[in-house]
Image: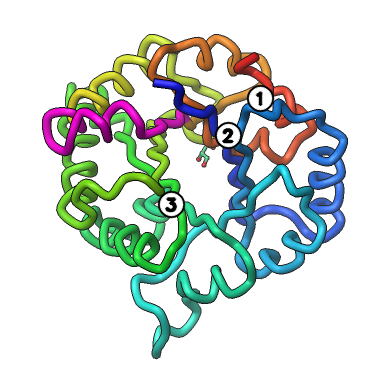
Amino acid sequence: MGRKFVVGGNWKMNGDKNQINEIVNNLKKGPLDPNVEVIVGVPAIYLSYVKTIIPDNVEVAAQNCWKSPKGAFTGEISPAMIKDVGVNWVILGHSERRTIFGEKDELVAEKVAHALESGLKVIACIGETLEERESGKTEEVVFRQLKALVSAIGDKWENIVLAYEPVWAIGTGKTATPQQAQDVHHALRNWLSANVSGSVSDAVRIQYGGSVTAANAKELASCKDIDGFLVGGASLKPEFVEIVNANQ
Ligand SMILES: O=C[C@H](O)COP(=O)(O)O
């Protein structure tokens, strides 16, 4: 146990320099719980800029990357480039990448493996759609997504944070209940224990994502297997500080 709470703010494709300055000023003002690891997921074009203004107690993540170091992949960025501008994290497999850009489990897993090999830490996202949940397939889907990851990375989970994000809860204002989230997180930990190792299962931090706000964060944070959040919309607002501090 003793997993450090970790809160990510995924800005998605939002923000210009003015808004970014406001968000960063708000993070500087905090105060942010020193026991929480805080990471902001920044659009690629602003990574270098954000690195120059972000306080030391907040880390920066890219929101995607490709699965090789360089080459003819127009429009893509590599983990090596992300590292080169001083950024140590990347978010991979977000449901928007999977649904809008057609990223399949295997591609996500290859990207995760390459990012880890390149020395990045990864927030790896998984989660079921509403249709899958309603047809009782939640566990089948998240286990399938995990299995693809394990095929690519084996037991090398030290630099991974897993984010469980039910697709039906993302940007919808419809949060999973603490019990629904806890049940899936618990099932993920059991699966990791059976298919990777007990120590990985105990150590890996599992974030919940999907319409997290200052109003629901405390109750979610109190669940045994919820080790943090991946926050979209609310990470652009001052309430993000309250979400970071919800585990107090
Ligand atoms: O990466 C964050 C998730 O997609 C959650 O987004 P949301 O908080 O706007 O629902």
**Which residue matches tag 3?**
122
Mark before the other along the chain sequence, 3 or 2: 2
Say if mark 3 contacts mark 2, CB within 8 Å: no
Q: Position of residue 141 (x, y in %)?
A: 20, 36
Q: Position of residue 37 (x, y in %)?
A: 60, 36
Mark before the other along the chain sequence, 3 or 1: 3
**Which residue matches tag 1?**
243
Q: CA distance from mark 1 to mark 2?
A: 8 Å
Say if mark 1 contacts mark 2, CB within 8 Å: yes
Q: Quadrant of the N terminus?
A: top left
Q: Residue at x 16, y 44 (%)?
A: 147
Where disc 2 sits, the SS reads: strand
State which region is magenta. Answer: 192-208
The answer to whether residue 228 is left or right of residue 106 is right
Q: Quadrant of residue 207?
A: top left
Say if mark 3 contacts mark 1, CB within 8 Å: no
